[in-house]
Image (tube, rainbow, N blue to C red):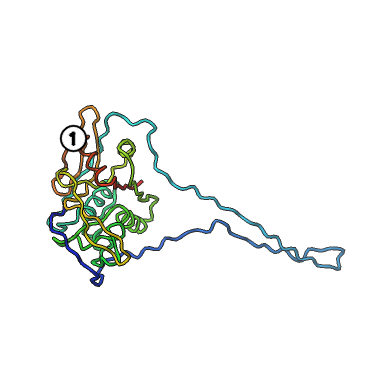
Amino acid sequence: MKQHGLLLFGGVVATFLFCACTASSDPLVSKIEQETSDFPVQQTKQITTTIQTTIVTTTTERAPQLLETVPERAVLEVEPIFQNPELPTGCEITSLTTLLQYLGFEVDKVTMANDYLFCTYDTAKYTLEDAYIGTPDSDNGFGCYAPVLVDAADCYLQTQNCEQKAIDLTGSREETICRYVASGYPVVMWITIGLYDMYEEIGWTTENGEEVMWCELEHCVLLHGYDKETNTVYVCDPLNGDVTYEMERYFQIYDDMHRRAMTIY
């Protein structure tokens, strides 16, 4: 996705596209006061009784429906989307859009990038975990990691009034990722272009002293299938379309990239 020299933005004033999402929450406890009056007692008194009823509403958090046993093979039919030419450094938002379209949502990558992806050049304050650094329609965009795509996905899903939610799967091992895919959830994952060896160096340091590590060949794809017997994974790659990789090598690079992943359930 990105193959350029390191750029140190310093404290450049942020110019960003931001989805202002506010999640509404229903109160768990609602109180209803009912008043009954004019209750006759001995025909000379009126007693007003206030009955306070507390109704406790419990909500069940929606959770992914995952298979107990991971099969040896699972392949989901997913149509790939290419990031170029509109988003030359937009592999992350393109992979997310591919996932959304697989789930039946009619949204395009440019809309997702412009309206739902938080972008900024302010490297003094932000890391790749907080925002897309740069802009995906630029050749000099850096990128972002799973939490940023989770936020973008949830912002969009809220506008659709649906039950689906994004989930950060960062840290998940191979077996867990395969379980999600086999259960019908393609997974957005961070690897390297062409599965080349991962090499990191310091990209910049925030004003709080946090050193942000950057992988020159960082890339983001959508895993939609695997076959353990043939050691194969099936991937929608925003640069190359629907491709296959050696499964062992793929997950090795995924591990090297600190196991960053997300999906929608």
Say above or below: 14 vs 104: below
Q: Residues within 10 Å of mark 1 (few under 14, many from 20)?
A: some
Q: State whether residue 45 appears in this view.
A: yes
182 or 144, which is in the foreground?
A: 144
Say above or below: 158 vs 247: below
Q: What is the residue that sits farthest to the bottom in this orientation?
A: 13
Q: What is the residue that sits farthest to the front in this orientation?
A: 209
Left or right side of 61 for 42: right
Determine the secondary structure under disc 1: strand
Where residue 123 appears, as percent x and y from the top left, is: 25, 65
Amino acid type, mark 1: Glu
Residue in view at x 17 percent, y 44 percent: 197
44 or 166, which is in the foreground?
A: 166
Residue in view at x 18 percent, y 60 percent: 141
The quarter of the picture where residue 155 lies is: bottom left
Tally the numbered discs: 1
Residue in view at x 31 percent, y 29 percent: 71
Where residue 227 appears, as percent x and y from the top left, is: 23, 31
Q: What is the residue that sits farthest to the top in this orientation?
A: 229
Task: Return the residue at label 1.
Answer: 246
Where residue 88 appears, as percent x and y from the top left, is: 14, 57
Q: State whether residue 116 appears in this view.
A: no
Say above or below: 254 vs 46: above
Say above or below: 258 vs 130: above
Where residue 261 appears, as percent x and y from the top left, is: 29, 47
81 or 49, which is in the foreground?
A: 81
